[in-house]
Image (cartoon, grey):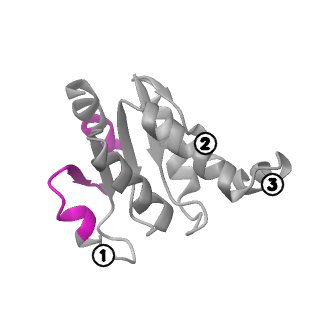
Amino acid sequence: MDIFFSGSIRGGRDDVDLYADLIALLEQHGTVLTEHVGTEDVETKEQAAGLTDGDIHDQDVAWLRRADAVVAEVTTPSLGVGYELGRAVAWETPVLALYRPDGEHELSAMVRGNDAVEVAEYRTLEEVAPVLEAFLRRE
């Protein structure tokens, strides 16, 4: 199974360590196409590789198109994550949005109100593992 993991990069990197932990859980179920989202210096590596914004867009859309499922951590609002979720929904790719309700921001109605997006609220990483397993087993 190819899994597209989405999390905030330019919108804020406070959760990068959590992203890495979530990616490690996802790797138990398949290939995570976007494991770079869980690395501290992702933007520096992109710049060093000479990637333009257009290159990043095209690469991410290709991975998104290839994915069997999308899992997004949506606690930190991100225009890029929202864009990716919209594309995945349009392509009828299964989407799971993970949200910590004790965060600073309320979850967007465009995510929570979309029947094509499964939203799972959690507080600890331990709570997420069975949610991921159940979601990915269905896909």
The numbered mark at residue 106 is 1
Query: In the figure, is residue 51 to the left or right of 33?
Result: right
Residue shown at 28% from the left, 55% from the top: 122
Quadrant in which the N terminus is drawn: top left
In this view of the protein, can residue 27 be seen by the observer?
yes
The amino acid at mark 1 is Glu
The numbered mark at residue 47 is 3
Residue shown at 53% from the left, 38% from the top: 62
Q: Where is residue 15 in the image (x, y as percent from the top left)?
A: 53, 59
* On screen, residue 28 above or below 109: above
The amino acid at mark 2 is Gln
Query: In the figure, is residue 61 to the left or right of 48?
Result: left
Q: Which of marks 1 and 3 is nearer the N terminus?
A: 3
C-alpha separation, residue under disc 1 versus residue under disc 3: 32 Å
Q: Name the residue under label 2.
A: 59
Asked if the magenta segment contains residue 116, the reply would be yes
| Dot 3 alpha-carbon crowd within 10 angstroms: few under 14, some 14 to 19, many 20 or more | few
The amino acid at mark 3 is Gln
Q: Are marks 1 and 3 in contact (CB under 8 Å)?
A: no
Can you tell which of label 1 and label 3 is closer to the viewer? 3
What kind of element bears circle 3? helix
Q: Where is residue 87 in the image (x, y as percent from the top left)?
A: 37, 51
Q: Position of residue 111 (x, y in %)?
A: 26, 62
Q: Which of marks 2 and 3 is nearer the N terminus?
A: 3
Query: In the figure, is residue 115 to the left or right of 60?
Result: left
**Magenta residues?**
110-131
Along the line of sight, the residue nearer the viewer: 47 or 55: 55
Q: Are marks 2 and 3 in contact (CB under 8 Å)?
A: no
The numbered mark at residue 10 is none
Q: Total label count?
A: 3
